[in-house]
Structures are given as structure tokens and as C-alpha cells.
Image (tube, rainbow, N blue to C red):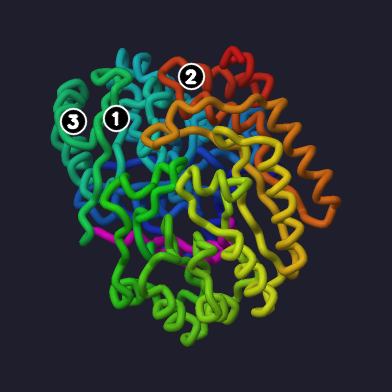
């Protein structure tokens, strides 16, 4: 394994936009997944940029090692990229958390940094160990399982909360007083005081949008791409989705002139990010401006009912070779049931457009295990997939198990038995007869995600146990009592 110091040197040399700043308050900003995942996170990058912008604060990045077992064997610890400083030496360690399964990464990062993972253990030695702050997209659903490890959880959109937090960290040296003060403020969850009842999430004002990349690097899922929000939130009502229209204030599109003005002249690849980018009323105008300037483009979410020759033609001109969209429900009955009103004809049109504009692949996301699903729904999915495979140049089906999330209409719906979901996948595979590539998340990991998504402090402690036992499914099953 290449030592971290060599990995760090190589990756820093390939970055554009890395920030260096001396300030009174230095934050170790950690991502609980490896570098190539963390540096693809627009939220992580926007917090990094904001901490450098605010007076008196700075940030250095750290990531879960690519090979945790080897990092432990070499006793490398966890250090930042900008200076190589041990994370445990910082007064504040902050994590951006996107999904439930990353909770194990939080515990592993703290262990590698020699920081007691439990907030209660750190509280007894407040002058010795850093303050641990967590935030990110997970707070819109259920942040309670991460509560045992966090001193403070920033709830929701952080643009207006971050200055409050930084001022409090700088001006109140007494940790206990600071925690009591923040617990009274909107958007701050202090698990030691609030228990398992988090306060509501905070929503940033529209004039604080959009978030955009600070650093570009070839070593990411979206190599060298400058990311920028085209919109935030969603105007649709899909019953399984945390970002549905009832969250926040619906969809908030960014004006084309503002969005385009924030893209650096040297950015040759631009990714438009948001929960419902294809619902932006001026998307074609934005894409045309980008591709006419010779830039490659990416769009984070394509809704099949919004695709037409103009939009797909612009995407193809911008370098698109894979069209990615979602059906979600296995049948039209289930799609209607969960308020996902994508029609079969929308998907067929997407497949035809994919072929007509010279793309190589149509990738379709589907959920199985929705409430009330039967074998007949899986049969309908197989027929649809074979139909689309005949229309598209090539079809890839990415199937994931349904996991009910807090703050959605399907909250508390049970998770289908793993054996039943495995049986449905086997049935689907037989019906597709090798004509469609079938991939996606294994149902067993959906079960782990479900237990955390619906869990509390106890499930968070189980995540720590599983992570320290190697992180296998068997370790998770033992820890969660499954």
C-alpha cells in the first residue's frame, strides 16, 4: 500500500483551487468515505469554501482511508491533506454525512484520529479532545443514530448556521456554556441536551444559493468537473423521498445569469447539481450557453417526462454518452401509488432519444419492495425492461430495495424480508435472459440502511460495534440483533 504522505502529495499536486489560510479557529473537515467520494460531494466542498471565507476560521480536509485495514496496520492515524496535521490536534472536527451507512465511517475516522468516538467520553476531558460537529443531507431524514458521537449536529442547510457556529466556537471558550447556548438556537441539535428529539431543519435564504465547487481534481467520481447547483429542493411529491416538495420551500431554481457568472472561465467540464435539475424552467438555456462555449456538461438528475429532442441533443453535444433516469416503482400501479408519475411512454421516449442522439447506454433506476408489491409487479418490470432494451442502444437496470425514511409519507413502513427481495431479483434476472445488465444494492445492505434510517441512539452504538468488528454484513447483523 502506498503511504498516506505519498498519496497526499500526489493528489494535492493534481488539485486546482486548494485553499490555505492561517486563522484562530482551525477545523478538520472530514468526509467519512474515501477521497474520490468525498471530493465529489458539493456540500462538503461548499462548507470547505465557507470556512475559509468566514473571518477567523479555516479548514483542512481529511477522508476515510482508501484501505482502512492497511492504514490501521501501518498505524498511520488520520491526517489532513493541506498540512498533514493529525486530525486529533484540531480544536474542532466536523463531518459531512450524506447517508446512513457512512455512520460507520465517522466512527472509524474518530478511532484512527485517536479521538474517543462517544461524546460522553470526550465531555469528561473537554480540554483534551476536539469538539465534534456533524451535518449534511442526512439531517433532513434521521440524524439521531449519530447522536452518541456528536457534540453538535447542524440541522439542514448550513449557509446561515455556519457563521453562528463559528462565532460561538470563537467567542465562548467554555464548552458546556456554548452547547447550552446553541441548543436554544434554531437549527442546532445538541444530543446530550435534546436527547433523541432533534429540532427542525433550517432552510437557507434563496440569496445564499447556489453552492459550487472550490476544488477540481481528476481523482473523483466526476473527474475534473466543476459542480454547481442549478436548483435546490424539489416541487414533486414522491412519497419515499426526503427532498419531496414538503421539505424546505419546494424547488428553488437559480437564475441562469447568476449560475453562469459563477462558473470559472477555465472550467471545461460543468456538472449541474440538484434534486430535480430537469424541472428547472431555463435548463435548455443554461445547457446551450455551456455547450456553445465548448464545455462538457453533466446533469445530476434526469426526469424522463422532461426529456425531449432539444434537451437530449444539448446533452449529447456536451459529451453525454449515458442517459440516467428513474422509474422507481416496478409497475405503473406502484409508481402512481407513491406519487411518482413517470409513465411508460416517458421511459420509451427516453430510450428512443438515447439511441437517436448517439448515446451508448440508458441507465434506469428502480425500487423494489415498495408497500403492496407483488410478483405481478416484478413481471411488469421485466416486460418494461425488455421493451426498453429493444428501443435503447443498451439498457442497464439498477435495482435498489425500498428503505423507508423519516419525514416522508412512507415513514415507518417495514422493510421487506431479505430472502423475499433476493427471490424477486432472481426472478427478474431469469426473465431478462441476459439481455439487460442488472445491478444495484444488495438487499442485505438495504436492511442495514433501514435499521439506521428508522433507529435511534442504540442503532448508532451498534454501528460503532459493527465498524470495529470489520464492517461485514455478519458484523452488522450481530450488532443490530438481526
- The picture quadrant where one finds residue 223 is bottom right
In screen coordinates, is 133 left or right of 381?
Answer: left
Graded by Cα atoms within 10 Å as few (under 14), some (14 to 19) or many (20 or more), the crowding at tag 1 reads many
In screen coordinates, is 152 left or right of 78?
Answer: left
**Residue at the outermost bottom position:** 292
Graded by Cα atoms within 10 Å as few (under 14), some (14 to 19) or many (20 or more), the crowding at tag 3 reads some
Q: Which residue is mark 2?
A: 459
Whichever of callouts 1 and 2 sits on the residue coming sooner in the sequence is: 1
Q: Residue 391 appears at what percent x and percent y?
A: 73, 69
Badge count: 3
Q: Which residue is mark 1?
A: 152
- Residue at the image point whose x is 53% and y is 22% from the top: 463
Mark 3 or 2: in front is 2
Query: Which contiguous range is marked in magenta?
Result: 208-228
Q: Is residue 134 magenta?
A: no
In screen coordinates, is 427 left or right of 122?
Answer: right
Give the secondary structure at mark 2: helix
Q: Residue 475 appears at what percent x and percent y?
A: 65, 19
Alpha carbon of mark 3 to alpha carbon of mark 2: how far?
A: 25 Å
Secondary structure character of the magenta stretch overall: loop
- Residue at the image point whose x is 63% and y is 46% from the top: 330
Q: Which residue is mark 3?
A: 182
Q: Vertically, is 390 above or below 256?
A: above
345 or 116: nearer the viewer: 345
- Residue at the image point whose x is 73% and y is 45% from the top: 379
Whichever of callouts 1 and 3 sits on the residue coming sooner in the sequence is: 1
Q: Residue 187 appears at what percent x and percent y?
A: 23, 37
Amino acid at each position: 500500500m502506498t503511504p498516506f504522505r505519498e498519496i497526499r502529495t500526489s493528489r494535492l499536486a493534481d488539485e486546482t483551487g486548494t485553499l490555505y489560510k492561517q486563522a484562530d479557529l482551525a477545523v478538520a473537515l472530514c468526509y467519512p468515505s474515501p477521497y474520490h467520494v468525498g471530493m465529489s460531494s458539493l456540500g462538503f466542498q461548499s462548507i470547505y469554501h465557507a470556512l475559509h471565507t468566514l473571518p477567523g476560521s479555516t479548514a483542512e480536509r481529511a477522508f476515510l482511508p482508501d484501505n482502512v485495514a492497511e492504514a490501521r496496520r501501518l498505524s498511520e492515524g488520520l491526517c489532513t491533506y493541506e498540512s498533514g496535521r493529525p486530525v486529533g490536534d484540531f480544536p474542532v472536527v466536523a463531518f459531512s454525512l450524506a447517508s446512513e451507512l457512512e455512520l460507520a465511517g465517522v466512527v472509524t475516522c474518530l478511532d484512527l484520529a485517536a479521538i474517543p468516538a462517544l461524546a460522553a467520553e470526550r465531555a469528561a476531558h473537554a480540554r483534551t479532545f476536539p469538539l465534534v460537529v456533524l451535518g449534511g443531507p442526512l439531517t433532513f431524514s434521521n440524524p439521531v443514530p449519530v447522536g452518541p458521537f456528536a457534540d453538535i449536529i447542524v440541522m439542514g442547510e448550513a449557509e446561515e448556521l455556519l457563521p453562528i457556529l463559528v462565532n460561538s466556537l470563537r467567542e465562548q471558550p467554555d464548552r458546556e456554556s456554548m452547547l447550552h447556548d446553541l441548543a436554544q438556537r434554531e437549527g442546532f441539535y445538541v444530543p446530550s441536551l435534546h436527547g433523541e428529539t432533534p429540532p427542525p431543519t433550517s432552510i437557507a435564504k434563496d440569496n445564499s444559493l447556489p453552492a459550487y465547487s472550490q476544488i477540481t481534481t481528476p481523482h473523483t467520481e466526476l473527474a475534473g468537473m466543476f459542480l454547481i447547483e442549478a436548483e435546490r429542493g424539489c416541487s414533486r411529491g414522491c412519497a419515499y423521498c426526503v427532498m419531496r416538495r414538503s421539505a424546505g420551500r419546494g424547488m428553488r431554481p437559480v437564475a441562469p445569469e447568476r449560475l453562469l457568472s459563477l462558473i470559472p472561465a477555465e472550467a471545461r467540464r460543468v456538472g449541474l447539481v440538484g434534486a430535480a435539475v430537469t424541472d428547472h424552467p431555463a435548463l435548455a438555456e443554461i445547457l446551450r450557453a455551456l455547450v456553445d462555449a465548448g464545455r462538457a456538461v453533466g446533469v445530476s438528475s434526469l426526469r424522463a417526462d422532461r426529456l425531449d429532442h432539444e434537451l437530449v441533443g444539448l446533452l449529447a453535444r456536451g459529451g453525454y454518452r449515458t442517459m440516467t433516469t428513474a422509474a422507481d416503482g416496478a409497475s405503473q400501479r406502484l409508481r402512481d401509488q407513491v406519487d411518482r408519475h413517470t409513465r411508460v411512454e416517458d421511459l420509451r421516449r427516453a430510450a428512443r432519444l438515447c439511441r437517436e442522439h448517439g448515446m451508448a447506454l440508458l441507465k434506469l433506476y428502480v425500487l423494489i419492495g415498495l408497500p403492496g408489491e407483488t410478483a405481478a409487479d416484478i413481471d411488469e418490470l421485466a416486460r418494461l425492461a425488455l421493451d426498453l432494451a429493444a428501443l435503447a442502444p443498451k439498457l442497464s437496470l439498477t435495482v435498489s430495495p425500498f428503505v423507508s425514511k423519516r419525514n416522508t409519507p412512507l415513514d415507518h413502513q417495514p422493510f421487506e424480508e431479505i430472502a423475499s427481495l433476493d427471490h424477486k431479483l432472481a426472478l427478474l434476472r431469469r426473465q431478462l435472459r441476459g439481455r439487460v445488465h442488472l445491478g444495484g444494492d444488495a438487499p442485505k445492505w438495504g436492511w442495514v440502511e433501514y435499521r439506521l434510517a428508522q433507529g435511534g441512539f442504540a442503532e448508532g452504538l451498534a454501528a460503532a460495534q459493527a465498524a470495529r468488528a470489520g464492517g461485514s454484513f455478519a458484523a452488522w447483523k450481530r450488532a443490530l440483533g438481526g
